[in-house]
Image (tube, helix red, strand yellow):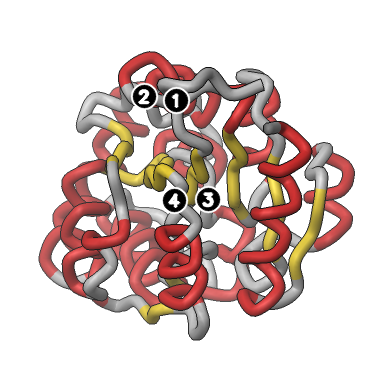
Amino acid sequence: MIPDDRRAAVLFDLDGTLTDPFVGITNCIRHAMEKMGRAAPEADALRAHIGPPLQVTFAQLLETDDEVRIWEAVGHYRDRYSQAGKFENVLIPGVTEVLARCIDAGYFLSLATSKLETYSRDILDHFDLTRFFDAIHGSAADGTRADKAHLIEHILSVEPIEAAGAVMIGDRHHDVHGAKANDVPTIGVLWGFGDRAELVQAGAVGICETPAALAAAIDDALMVRS
């Protein structure tokens, strides 16, 4: 049951959920790998690395647990991403309409992304999406809150919302697991970088193939929790 002083809330992932960042992220990962003296993987081979925190991605790609090397690679990535990569990005068709319907329904909307919060704000501004959000939350430069479970825990602690009246929207298992760790269900979306099997196995309570189906799925999920 949602307390009277709390609003039903929708937490949105960014990459693969609101926008398609494939070109920008893969260009920046390949740039960082070249700077680290390693062969740059083909862009398509990097699709599975879109979603997790950067330090996780570079630990895997560099095959190392050396924090110095991992963060050096993250630095090279951010050098390019801050200038060009964040705008090598495309708005998912239909997302604006979903956000507008959520606002009309009176939901509290928060961004919940592992991406740096500063970059996330720039991207939302670029696509004129900031106006829909009550709160914008992402990771800090030192990696704090890059883990989705820690991020959502933080959002629930500082915003006027409750886990009992919230739902997460995301495209990867990290979104589902992070939300589940905070007793928040997730609706998975299939226009991003995870597939149905990944999302179902992680425990998504619903799957949407198109943005057109998402607004109704959000209403249904929050009605069950009200």
**Mark 4 or 3: the one toward you:** 4
Number of numbered discs overlaid on the protein picture? 4
Which image quadrant is residue 216 in? bottom right
Q: Residues within 10 Å of mark 4 (few under 14, many from 20)?
A: few
**Mark 4 or 2: the one toward you:** 4
Q: Which mark is residue 6?
A: 1
Which image quadrant is residue 28 in? bottom left
Q: Earlier in the sequence, mark 1 or mark 3?
A: 1
- The one nearer the camera, 72 or 48, is 48
Measured Cα–Cα span from mark 4 to mark 3: 28 Å
* Proximity of marks 4 and 1: CB atoms separated by less than 8 Å: no
Across and down, in percent, residue 156 comes to: 44, 21
Quadrant (top left/top right/bottom left/bottom right) for the N terminus: top right
Q: Amino acid at mark 3?
A: Gly
Q: Residues within 10 Å of mark 3 (few under 14, many from 20)?
A: many
Q: Residues within 10 Å of mark 2 (few under 14, many from 20)?
A: few
* Proximity of marks 4 and 2: CB atoms separated by less than 8 Å: no
Which residue position holds label 2? 160
Quadrant (top left/top right/bottom left/bottom right) for the C terminus: top right
Q: Which mark is residue 51?
A: 3
**Mark 1 or 2: the one toward you:** 1
Q: Secondary structure at mark 1?
A: loop
Across and down, in percent, residue 187 comes to: 70, 50
Q: Amino acid at mark 2?
A: Pro
Measured Cα–Cα span from mark 4 to mark 1: 11 Å
Q: Which mark is residue 106?
A: 4
Measured Cα–Cα span from mark 2 to mark 3: 27 Å
